[in-house]
Image: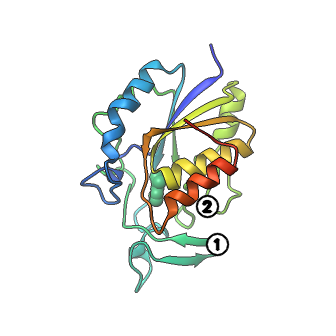
């Protein structure tokens, strides 16, 4: 038993080439992630899991296009193409991802009116997903994150994890970014400043 856990973020079809919100070379990380899973003591997966008509979808806002930003009651929100709809093929894990060893799959973004980039808190920054409590109760205090996308769900999760008192590494060559208007450089700096170890 060790206190180390690997957290694989959103390695789902819709974030891979051919998917609704494809991250460039998103599927290119699958072999390395599989190796990391094989070597990990504990594995947790996150799964972006939106109901149809989710408020983060541009299609839910008349006159708006994907990648526009709008003001939500909880703050600025980027609008996305419809993606990771619950039960769809796009929401499934990449077919080559070897997920059988995962001890927990934490789903996020299932509340219709609030998005959730972080595996720990929804985008209102106050609604917890329950992951911090799960990890604490199991004594899993040292986290390594990888997956998609570097500058959204991976970065938000990593920064929140540090704030929650965990030791956090992000394995960059097992991540790929979206990079909207410089978001990749920006979030890399945020991670460094936030106490995340980039490896
Ligand atoms: C993500 C945008 C919308 C991600 C999820 O996994 O980084 N990005 N939903
Ligand atoms: Zn999403």
Residue at 61% across / 61% down in the picture? Answer: 123
- In primary-sequence order, the first of circles 2 and 1 is 1
Residue 37, visible in the rendered structure:
yes
Q: Which residue is mark 2?
A: 123
Q: Is residue 35 left or right of residue 169?
A: left
Q: Name the outermost residue toward the left.
A: 18
Q: Name the outermost residue toward the bottom.
A: 63
Q: Is residue 108 above or below residue 80?
A: above
Q: Position of residue 140 (x, y in %)?
A: 66, 26
Q: Which residue is mark 1?
A: 75
Q: Is residue 35 above or below residue 8?
A: above
Residue at 68% across / 59% down in the picture? Answer: 125
**Of the pair 78 and 115, the residue shown nearer to us:** 78
Q: Is residue 54 above or below residue 16?
A: below
Question: What color scheme is it?
Answer: rainbow
Q: Is mark 1 within 8 Å of ligand 1?
A: no
Q: Quadrant of residue 3?
A: top right
**Gap in angstroms between the C-alphas marked 2 and 1:** 8 Å
Q: Secondary structure at mark 2?
A: loop
Labels 2 & 1 near each other (Cβ < 8 A): yes
Q: Quadrant of residue 52?
A: bottom left
Q: Is residue 141 left or right of residue 12?
A: right
Q: Is residue 15 left or right of residue 186?
A: left
Task: Give the quarter of the figure containing the C terminus.
Answer: top right
């Amino acid at each position: 038993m060790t206190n180390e856990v690997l957290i694989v973020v959103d390695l789902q079809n819709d974030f891979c080439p051919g998917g609704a919100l494809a991250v460039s070379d998103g599927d290119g990380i699958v072999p390395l992630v599989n190796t990391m899973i094989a070597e990990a003591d504990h594995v947790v997966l996150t799964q972006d899991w939106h109901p149809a008509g989710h408020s983060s979808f541009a299609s839910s806002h008349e006159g708006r296009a994907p990648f526009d930003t709008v003001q939500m009651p909880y703050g600025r929100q980027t609008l996305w193409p419809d993606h990771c709809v619950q039960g769809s093929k796009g929401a499934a894990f990449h077919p080559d991802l070897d997920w059988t060893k995962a001890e927990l799959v934490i789903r996020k973004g299932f509340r219709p009116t609030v998005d959730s980039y972080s595996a720990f808190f929804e985008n209102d920054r106050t609604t917890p997903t329950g992951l911090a409590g799960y990890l604490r109760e199991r004594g899993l205090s040292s986290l390594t994150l990888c997956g998609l996308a570097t500058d959204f769900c991976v970065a938000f999760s990593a920064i929140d994890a540090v704030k929650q008192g965990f030791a956090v590494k992000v394995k960059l060559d097992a991540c790929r970014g979206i990079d909207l208007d410089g978001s990749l450089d920006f979030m890399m700096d945020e991670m460094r400043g936030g106490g995340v170890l980039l490896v």
